[in-house]
Image (cartoon, grey):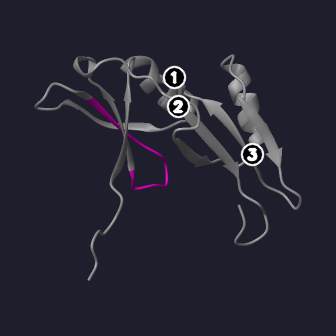
Amino acid sequence: MQIVTKLLHTRYRVNDLASTVRFYTEILGLAEVRRHKSPRGSELVFLQTPGSEELIEICSFPASGPVHVQADLTHLAFEVASLEEFGQHLARHNLKFSDGPTMKEGGGGFAFIDAPEGYEIELIEPSKQPNSY
């Protein structure tokens, strides 16, 4: 018996909806696919990564109090073709990696940036070796 069939979305609640959506669309290149207000009053924006079906739901719900993201609580990971090129992209936006890049022997590597609100984003350059990140 199959219990679940696929991952649909992941939610991150934020204090500043506009700056967070701007970060995900302008810096990471995600597309806004829909936006609406929930029955309880949450402002919801759904974003999608090119090449993926799953969505990221960014939620603003001030009535539940401010968001305080603790260090190393959670992160999203995105594949990039080149960490070096992504670093140059960040620099053009006056941003930089918060950790790394850490390159692996044989190619590939990873780095982190901080999204607004303090959520961590991992960027992974795949190794040229099969079955390896």
Other residues around mark 1 within 10 Å, as few (<14) / some (14–19) / many (≥20): some
Which type of secondary structure does the marked residue at label 3 adopt? loop
Q: Position of residue 38 (x, y in %)?
A: 16, 32
Q: Where is residue 59 in the image (x, y as percent from the top left)?
A: 31, 30
Q: In this view, does 117 lie to the left or right of 81?
A: left
Q: Give the range drawn in magenta.
A: 44-54
**Distance between the Cα atoms at labels 3 and 2?**
22 Å
Magenta stretch: residue 51 in it? yes
**Distance between the Cα atoms at labels 2 and 1?**
7 Å
Cβ atoms under marks 3 and 1 closer than 8 Å: no
Magenta stretch: residue 5 in it? no
Which type of secondary structure does the marked residue at label 1 adopt? helix
Badge 3 amino acid: Ser
Q: Is residue 117 left or right of residue 42?
A: right
Q: Where is residue 75 in the image (x, y as percent from the top left)?
A: 54, 41
Q: Which residue lies at the image location 57% right of the left edge and 34% below the top edge? A: 120
Find disc 1 in the rendering and name its residue: 116
User: Between 77 and 34, which is closer to the camera in this rendering?
Assistant: 77
Tag nearer the camera, 3 or 2: 2
Badge 2 amino acid: Tyr
Cβ atoms under marks 2 and 1 closer than 8 Å: yes
Q: Earlier in the sequence, mark 3 or mark 2?
A: 3
**Distance between the Cα atoms at labels 3 and 1?**
23 Å
Badge 1 amino acid: Pro
User: Between 22 and 124, which is closer to the camera in this rendering?
Assistant: 124
The C terminus, quarter of image: bottom right
Other residues around mark 3 within 10 Å, as few (<14) / some (14–19) / many (≥20): some
Q: Which residue lies at the image location 13% right of the left edge and 29% below the top edge? A: 40
Q: Based on the displayed image, in which of its 4 quarters is residue 53 positioned? A: bottom left
Find disc 3 in the rendering and name its residue: 82
Cβ atoms under marks 3 and 2 closer than 8 Å: no
Find disc 2 in the rendering and name its residue: 119
